[in-house]
Image: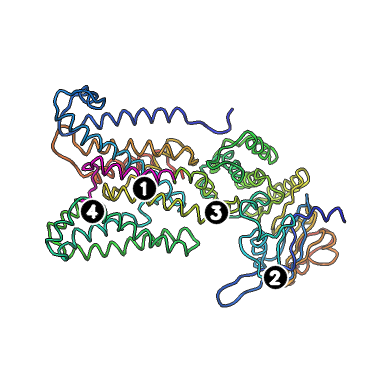
């Protein structure tokens, strides 16, 4: 009898499901491409039509990879925040990351009228939005971090993050008040989130920053487990609370920050994935939870993306709506069925 | 006596405890000189608000002393890193667990954290020590249960097992018997007595169960306003230390039974 339960079988199943979802995601889209041509393209051999090859390598493949990065990254940062804040309602955005990003983007899009139209034209490029989102989230996060170093209580950081979110939200509404209808529409479209539109070059930068965040989160597994006992016990076990807290916050910011910069503020995934994973794996051990959340987040995001593409039609629904529309009922159903929250 | 000198696990020298704020410092108790020896079970008693928790917090480096020093294993407390301290001092606190979704085994195994590698993998030696702790606290039969399935009494045993698995010379427990029924109060204290005797660990606990503590402890720390005394329970009874614990209008200490009686 092993003292610690092993989870090899669920991990194997989840990995297979992930691979399956990855191929389903790639083979579905507005243009119908036969499945063997999809494989041919992925393996680098000839496809029946050249345009198909182009669609797959330059559009669908980067989108599927983005979906995996976004789903796993948001799920992991949600897990980190829920453990750090001892709060099942915490998600990656409690530190003000998404509100900071929206402030940055709102300033660029809605405030462009203030800078004059010629200047606005060069501001409108994709990179400027990415940079604005990163800058915005970095600024708000930095403010939260500075204040968090001054307070001892972890719960206070949660409140401070929420307060910064309301400050930025009100600045954004002031900006929207002065914005034109066209600008408002553009801002709202950014808020829908989008997994597509990323070139391989952008994806490279995305994944480098993502990897840093992921590595720090893996390095935090032990301190996360210790934190399950509460901060006083963790301290008595020799854990440097301030340093581990900082590492966890930095990891979350890197993950959720880049995701928001490149794919927009994707709601819900970060909050829901850790709960779904806990329902299935029924453990609080982060050594199990972290890889499980990684797999599960990727799967859910790929599924949501496949649905938002509305196969064989030109329609693309906002990914942000799909994630909540699919995810929320699942969570409710799971909680009602299990009748208790595992945390 | 000389033999005892070598086995002093915890010692305080002219310790003053209290709180420091920007404007003033509040001294709760001063001139505290206590010594705890190896293998002793020591009870800390005192009225509510007298500073038991403050004393324990100071002894465990959660807060700094106002004056004086605390020595653990003859080394000043302030010179020990958190990780070093975790290997000589373990705690059982009154605060609630954050996650009760851990299994009993997992929770007790968390006591091995100061010894495990960066990802917290348990070696066979770690597992042996964890199992030993489960055995010593008689909770092997529930080791696969989740913590939310346990009763308060069982949970307290689990927390004690966790402290045992940390493998420290000194275990400090903050009111380990609150919320427990009379049987389990006696059970936990008796368990502590047994552990101190069998493992040679020094166990210090604060409690309001004065009568039980008198019967079980090797020595007791009695905190009254402005005065902290440590001695064997029988000596403390003789010197009348327990009578000074509380205001005299309601209850009185009965020396023959070693317990408090309501005044008629």
Label 3 or label 1, whichever comes before in sequence order: 3
Q: Are marks 1 and 2 in contact (CB under 8 Å)?
A: no
**Label ID, residue A255:** 1
In this rendering, do the residues under marks 3 and 2 share a single chain?
A: no
The image shows residue A255 at horizontal and vertical percentages of 36, 47
Are labels 1 and 2 assigned to the same chain?
no
- Secondary structure, mark 1, is helix
Frontmost residue, A265 versus B163: A265
- Residue topped by disc 2: B29
Q: Which mark is residue A129?
A: 4
Residue B264: tell me if it is visible.
Answer: no
Q: Earlier in the sequence, mark 3 or mark 4?
A: 4
x and y, in percent, of residue A329 in the image: 31, 42
Q: Is residue B258 left or right of residue A61?
A: right
Is A339 left or right of B255, judged from the image as shown? left
Residues at discs 2 and 4 in contact (Cβ within 8 Å): no
Residue under pointer 3: A240
Parent chain of label 4 = A
Q: How many numbered tags mark residues here? A: 4
Of residue A190 and residue A231, the one placed in the foreground of this image is: A190
Q: Nearer the viewer, mark 3 or mark 2?
A: 3
Q: Chain of mark 1?
A: A
Q: Which residues are magenta?
A: A190-215
- Mark found first going from the N terminus, 4 or 1: 4
Vertical order, B223 against B92 (above or below): below
Look at the image and say whether residue A192 sits in the magenta stretch.
Answer: yes
Q: Image height check: is B146 above or below B17?
A: above
Q: CA distance from mark 1 to mark 2?
A: 49 Å
Q: Furthest-right residue in view?
A: B1
């Amino acid at each position: 009898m092993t003292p610690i339960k092993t989870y090899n079988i669920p991990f194997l199943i989840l990995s297979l499901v992930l691979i399956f979802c990855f191929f389903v995601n790639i083979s579905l889209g507005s243009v119908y491409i036969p499945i063997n041509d999809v494989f041919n393209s992925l393996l680098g051999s000839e496809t029946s039509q050249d345009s198909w090859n182009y669609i797959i390598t330059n559009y669908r493949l980067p989108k599927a990879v983005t979906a995996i990065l976004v789903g796993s990254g948001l799920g992991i940062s949600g897990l980190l925040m829920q453990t750090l804040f001892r709060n099942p309602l915490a998600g990656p955005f409690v530190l003000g990351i998404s509100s900071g990003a929206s402030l940055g983007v709102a300033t660029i899009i809605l405030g462009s009228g203030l800078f004059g139209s010629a200047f606005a034209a060069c501001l409108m490029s994709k990179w400027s939005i990415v940079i604005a989102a990163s800058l915005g989230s970095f600024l708000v996060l930095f403010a939260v971090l500075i204040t968090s170093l001054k307070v001892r209580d972890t719960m206070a950081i949660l409140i401070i993050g929420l307060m910064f979110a309301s400050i930025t939200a009100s600045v954004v509404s002031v900006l929207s008040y002065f914005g034109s209808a066209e600008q408002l529409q553009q801002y709202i479209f950014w808020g829908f989130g989008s997994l597509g539109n990323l070139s391989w070059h952008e994806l490279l930068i995305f994944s480098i920053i993502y990897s840093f965040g992921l590595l720090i989160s893996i390095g935090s597994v032990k301190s996360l487990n210790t934190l399950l006992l509460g901060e006083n016990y963790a301290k008595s076990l020799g854990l440097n609370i301030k340093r581990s807290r900082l590492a966890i916050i930095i990891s979350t910011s890197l993950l959720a920050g880049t995701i928001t910069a490149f794919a927009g503020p994707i709601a819900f995934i970060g909050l829901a994935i850790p709960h779904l994973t806990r329902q299935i794996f029924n453990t609080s051990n982060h050594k199990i939870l972290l890889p499980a959340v990684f797999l599960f987040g990727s799967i859910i995001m790929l599924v949501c993306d496949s649905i938002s593409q509305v196969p064989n039609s030109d329609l693309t629904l906002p990914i942000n709506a799909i994630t909540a529309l699919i995810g929320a009922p699942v969570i409710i159903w799971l909680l009602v069925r299990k009748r208790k929250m595992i945390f | 006596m000389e033999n005892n000198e070598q086995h002093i696990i915890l010692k305080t020298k002219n310790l003053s405890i209290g709180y420091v704020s920007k404007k003033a410092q509040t001294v709760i108790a001063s001139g505290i000189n206590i010594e705890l020896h190896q293998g002793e079970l020591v009870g800390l008693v005192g009225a509510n608000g007298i500073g038991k928790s403050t004393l324990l917090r100071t002894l465990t480096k959660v807060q700094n002393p106002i004056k004086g020093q605390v020595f653990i294993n003859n080394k000043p407390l302030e010179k020990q890193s958190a990780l070093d301290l975790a290997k000589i001092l373990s705690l059982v606190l009154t605060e609630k667990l954050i996650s009760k979704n851990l299994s009993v085994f997992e929770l007790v195994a968390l006591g091995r954290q100061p010894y495990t590698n960066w990802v917290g993998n348990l070696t066979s030696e770690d597992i042996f020590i964890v199992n030993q702790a489960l055995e010593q606290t008689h909770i092997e039969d529930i080791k696969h249960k989740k913590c939310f399935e346990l009763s308060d009494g069982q949970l307290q045993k689990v927390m004690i097992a966790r402290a045992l698995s940390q493998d420290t010379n000194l275990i400090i427990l903050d009111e380990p018997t609150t919320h427990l029924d009379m049987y389990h109060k006696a059970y936990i204290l008796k368990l502590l007595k047994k552990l101190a005797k069998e493992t040679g660990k020094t166990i210090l606990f604060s409690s309001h169960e004065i009568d039980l503590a008198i019967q079980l402890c090797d020595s007791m720390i009695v905190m009254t306003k402005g005065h902290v005394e440590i001695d064997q329970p029988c000596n403390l009874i003789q010197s009348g230390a327990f009578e000074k614990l509380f205001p005299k209008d309601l209850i009185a200490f009965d020396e023959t039974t070693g317990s408090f009686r309501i005044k008629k």
